[in-house]
Image (cartoon, rainbow, N blue to C red):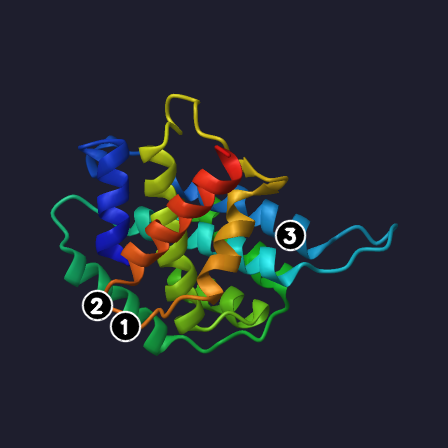
């Protein structure tokens, strides 16, 4: 996933690691969006949309991984650091809102990212590592797909037949095998087919 994230970020900016982008800020703002999907308004009836909560968590993971890159530090070293942090972490057992707030607070306080606090959020929202991988690859491919179809130029159509591309992605991922060596290629092909059918008509 770190390798895929590096490729995506390089697509947007060739020297992205040295640019000092505020990845922590993107991560905590996504935390707010996640809580919006879970619900926080006690003054009205709200049902948690856990599928969207998990999608927002995957978005946070994109930005969180990006925040862990430091010039001169290899992907293998970053992966080892993540593994060591998770091995040493005792899960907090917090609920979705509380785990999200703890992660956002860490992002704001350190201008960094905590894989272990993200793991607490995963556990709270019912997202396991297989699910994280499947959804991450799907969203990474969608981000490339968007770039290939005019996202930066503003010509990409995000709503396909009345639904956002994210929703179509979730549907398509259910029919594909994440263990397949060509999983990412299959996701891209499925997106391409549906985009042509539903968005471009």
- Crowding near the residue tagged with mark 3, few <14, some 14–19, many ≥20 C-alpha atoms within 10 Å: some
x, y percent for residue 176:
40, 66
Dividing the picture into quarters, in which one does residue 90 lie?
A: bottom left
Disc number lying in front (3 or 2):
3
Residue 33 visible in the picture: yes
> Disc 3 versus disc 2: distance between alpha carbons?
30 Å
Q: Secondary structure at mark 2?
A: helix
**Which label's residue is closer to the chain start, 3 or 2?**
3
Disc number lying in front (1 or 3):
3
Q: Which disc is residue 80 wearing?
A: 2
- Residue depicted at 45% across the width and 61% down the height: 173
**Residue tagged 1:** 84
x, y percent for residue 194:
46, 46
The N terminus: image quadrant? bottom left
Count of numbered badges drawn on the protein: 3
**Which label's residue is closer to the chain start, 1 or 3?**
3
> Disc 1 versus disc 2: distance between alpha carbons?
6 Å
Q: Secondary structure at mark 3?
A: helix
In the image: residue 25, left or right of residue 32: left
- Crowding near the residue tagged with mark 2, few <14, some 14–19, many ≥20 C-alpha atoms within 10 Å: few
Q: Which disc is residue 35 wearing?
A: 3
Q: Is residue 175 above or below residue 111?
A: below
Q: Secondary structure at mark 1?
A: helix
x, y percent for residue 13:
24, 31
> Disc 1 versus disc 3: distance between alpha carbons?
28 Å
């Amino acid at each position: 996933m770190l390798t895929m994230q590096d490729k995506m970020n390089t697509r947007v900016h060739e020297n992205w690691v040295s640019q000092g982008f505020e990845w922590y800020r993107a991560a905590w703002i996504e935390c707010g969006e996640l809580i919006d999907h879970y619900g926080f308004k006690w003054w009205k009836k709200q049902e948690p949309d856990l599928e969207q909560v998990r999608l927002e968590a995957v978005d946070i993971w994109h930005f969180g991984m990006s925040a862990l890159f430091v010039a001169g530090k290899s992907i293998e070293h970053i992966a080892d650091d993540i593994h060591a942090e998770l091995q040493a972490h005792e899960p907090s057992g917090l609920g979705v809102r509380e785990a999200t707030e703890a992660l956002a607070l860490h992002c704001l306080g350190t201008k960094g990212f905590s894989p272990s606090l993200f793991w607490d959020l995963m556990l709270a929202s019912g997202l396991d590592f297989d699910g994280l991988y499947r959804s991450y690859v799907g969203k990474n491919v969608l981000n490339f797909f968007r770039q290939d179809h005019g996202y930066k130029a503003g010509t990409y159509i995000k709503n396909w037949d009345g639904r956002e591309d994210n929703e179509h992605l979730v549907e398509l991922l259910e029919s594909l095998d994440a263990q397949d060596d060509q999983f990412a290629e299959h996701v891209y092909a499925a997106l391409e087919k549906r985009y042509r059918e539903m968005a471009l008509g």
